[in-house]
Image (cartoon, helix red, strand yellow):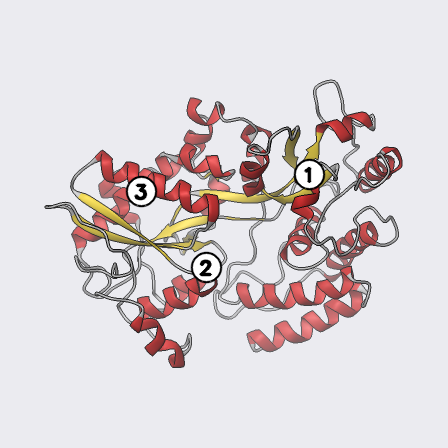
Amino acid sequence: MVKRLFVGIFGLVLTAFVLSACSGSGGSDSAAGGENDVEIPEGATEVVMWNLFGGGDAEYMQDIVGKFNESQSEYFVNNVMQEHEEYYTKLLTSIGAGKGPDIGIAHTHVLPELVNQGLVTGLDDIASSVGVKWDEFNQNILDATIYEGVHYAVPIDTHAQIMYINNKLVGDAGLLNDDGSVKMEQTPEGYVDFFTTLKDNLPEGKIPFAFSSSGNDPYWLWWGYYTQLGGRGILTEDSLENPKYDIDLDKAVQAANFLKDLYHDKEIIPLNISDFYAEFQSENAATMTSGVWATGIWETTEGLDFTPMPIPNVFGEKGAWASSHTLVLPYYQDANQEVQKGALEFMKFVADNGAMWAQAGHIPAKDSVVESEEFQELPYRNEYAEVASYVNFVDRNIYARGVEEIVVRHLDTVWAGDATAEEAFAAIETEVKKLIGE
């Protein structure tokens, strides 16, 4: 069974700092809303949401909050912005102390920590009372929020890593079909041939593939290749808190070497690009790879003729890295049931209005929204919406964030040419096993 542990293991030394930043008591009419000086309409029940978004995402979410508040008078969602870097430490510690928000935002890879510690409430009963219909959600996305048969979050999107092409540069290189799709055989050889031909035919100084050579981006691409090869994770999924190291080493090494060759042997991706977004936005790069959130940037860039597409499935199985934003209901022993009901009303509203959220580039979590006229009328999104059904989420356990940090750090040495893939994964195995106590 999922543990119900209300402990301060996330840094007791931080408690005083965190609590000083949080006012009110979680789940009550005076919930932690002190950070936002807003006027609650008379007669409305305040529902405090903590928001980790920045930039365009923050604006789109505030638009949804505003629309919800205008649509009815029973509840008022107080949208409280938080610092992204401190968000999860503050969220987990504050809920455990009974001082958190009424609604939290959680990525799917953090959800296991919240579930395992009993910091979030199972949603089935309350969701049923407000008319949430789980069968309207994309099952692949929804599955990442279910533990022991219980729904613990309302997913609002999936945000996958995809590929973007500059239509002019790729077209001038003779690599676009009449329908605008790329001329690429979806095999490892075909993928490399596409970029080699592109490199040979681009004007001098143009980049065939703008991409980072460190950090999360190449880790996400490695994960996509690894899952296309049939790799299913790094740890087992038989336990949230006691998984075992279970990487498929041969596939992990093959995926890493394939990407490494794009940097080094093939010289398709230049090393150490200072800002690969800027290279694509300025039309200096023919392609780039990033998350779907870049769509909103490119479509507002004057004169940029681009097309988004899924990461090519070059290794046989469909696969791509993705995460999801979900809305969770923090657990409080004496939770205000009216506030909880309002929280679920809002969660349902956000999911139902996923086309508004899709303006940020994200793929709505509900199939019914993806099929809606409002979503279908948005440009570009249909080019990659299909990936929602086959994206591969990271392992579902409490160590997901720690494992990611270890893997990213060691894979960076591979991309830099400072270590072989075998050396990197030997070091990863040692550190991950130490992390999980194996």
- Against 298, is 181 above or below? above
Does the residue at mark 2 contact the one at mark 1 (Cβ under 8 Å)? Answer: no
Marks 2 and 1, how far apart in space?
28 Å
Q: Quadrant of residue 334?
A: bottom left
Q: Residues within 10 Å of mark 2 (few under 14, many from 20)?
A: few
Return the disc, 3 or 2, that comes first in the chain's sequence: 3
Please report contact status of discs 3 and 2: CB closer than 8 Å, yes or no: no
Say which residue appears at 42% left-offset and 47% top-offset.
Answer: 58
* Mark 3: amino acid: Val
- Return the x and y of residue 424 as percentages of the image width and height: 75, 68
Residue 5 seen from this side: no
Amino acid found under the numbered disc labelled 2: His
Q: Name which of mark 2 and mark 1 comes first in the sequence.
A: 2
- Label 1 neighbourhood size at 10 Å, few (<14), some (14-19), many (20+)? few
* Quarter of the image where the C terminus is located: bottom right
Q: Give how far across and how far down residue 431 sits, in percent.
A: 65, 75
- Write the residue at 42% across / 32% down: 355
Q: CA distance from mark 3 to mark 2?
A: 19 Å
Q: Nearer the viewer, mark 2 or mark 1?
A: 1
- Disc 2 designates what residue? 84
Q: Please give the label number shown on residue 65.
A: 3
Q: Judging from the image, what secondary structure is the residue with disc 3 in?
A: helix
Please tell me whether mark 2 sits on a helix, a strand or a loop.
helix
Instruction: Tell me which numbered mark, 1 or 3, is placed earlier along the sequence.
Output: 3
Q: Which residue is mark 1?
A: 282
Farthest residue, direction top? 178
- Please identify the residue farthest to the bottom as the structure is shown: 13
Q: Judge by depth and name the residue closer to the eye, 79 or 256.
A: 79
Q: Which mark is residue 77?
A: none
Determine which quarter of the picture holds residue 294.
top right
Mark 1: which amino acid?
Ser
